[in-house]
Amino acid sequence: MFKLLIFAALLTVAYSQRQAVAYLADPEGKSGVNGNITFYETPFGVFVVGEVHGLTPGKHGFHIHEYGNISPGCKAMGSHYNPYNMTHGGPNDKIRHVGDLGNIEADNNGIAFVNMMDRVIALRGVNDIVGRGVVVHNTTDDLGKGGDEESLKTGNAGSRLACGVVGKNSNF
């Protein structure tokens, strides 16, 4: 897996046509969680890389949400981005929301280093995430395998700690 990510990173630098970025914060100022995420278009999907600070150690749900609206806080971002009306799943599942990116994991210093490839989200077309929201949640996403209705909707990922809007950058 590590070799695949290195290969994808090299291809990203060489062939990326589009890039987008999201700066994460808690609009209400309660959690102290913040970070930045960059999305690189590659021939194999979208390479997602960044850092999130101020988390409790462990796994935290990480999703693309419907709306890029932070004016009244992260709740205004709506539900997970789900244009095909699927149930919640993990990033490698065939049945999943487009926005289901799984979990990021914070180390003992509260920092999560994001480094993943996703073949479903896109920076153009039907699964375009530009203008939508990125949300980091309080608890682990159970990837739709929790055995209850909420699991199939949200992965039981808990409250929203930080969010940001996916925007075009200078390499778009």
Image (tube, rainbow, N blue to C red):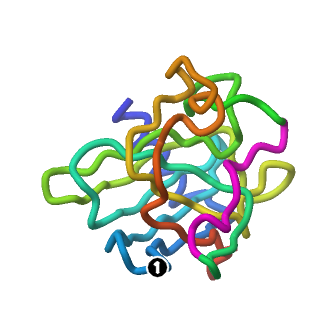
Q: Position of residue 165 (x, y in %)?
A: 62, 72
Q: Is residue 17 above or below residue 9?
A: below
Residue drawn where x is 27% and y is 66% of the image: 54
Q: Position of residue 28 (x, y in %)?
A: 46, 79
Residue drawn where x is 86% and y is 49% of the image: 126
For the N terminus, the quadrant is top left
Residue named by callout 1: 28
For the C terminus, the quadrant is bottom right
What crowding class fits label 1: few (fewer than 14 Cα within 10 Å), some (14-19), or many (20 or more)? some
* Magenta-highlighted residues: 73-84
Residue 28 makes an appearance in the image: yes
Classify mark 1: helix, strand or loop.
loop
Give left or right: position of 143 versus 41.
Answer: left
Q: List the single residue furthest toward the top.
A: 147
14 within the magenta span? no
Residue 6 makes an appearance in the image: no
Q: Position of residue 160 (x, y in %)?
A: 48, 59
Between residue 99 and residue 75, name the one nearer to us: 75
79 within the magenta span? yes
Q: List the single residue furthest toward the left.
A: 108
Q: Position of residue 70 (x, y in %)?
A: 62, 76
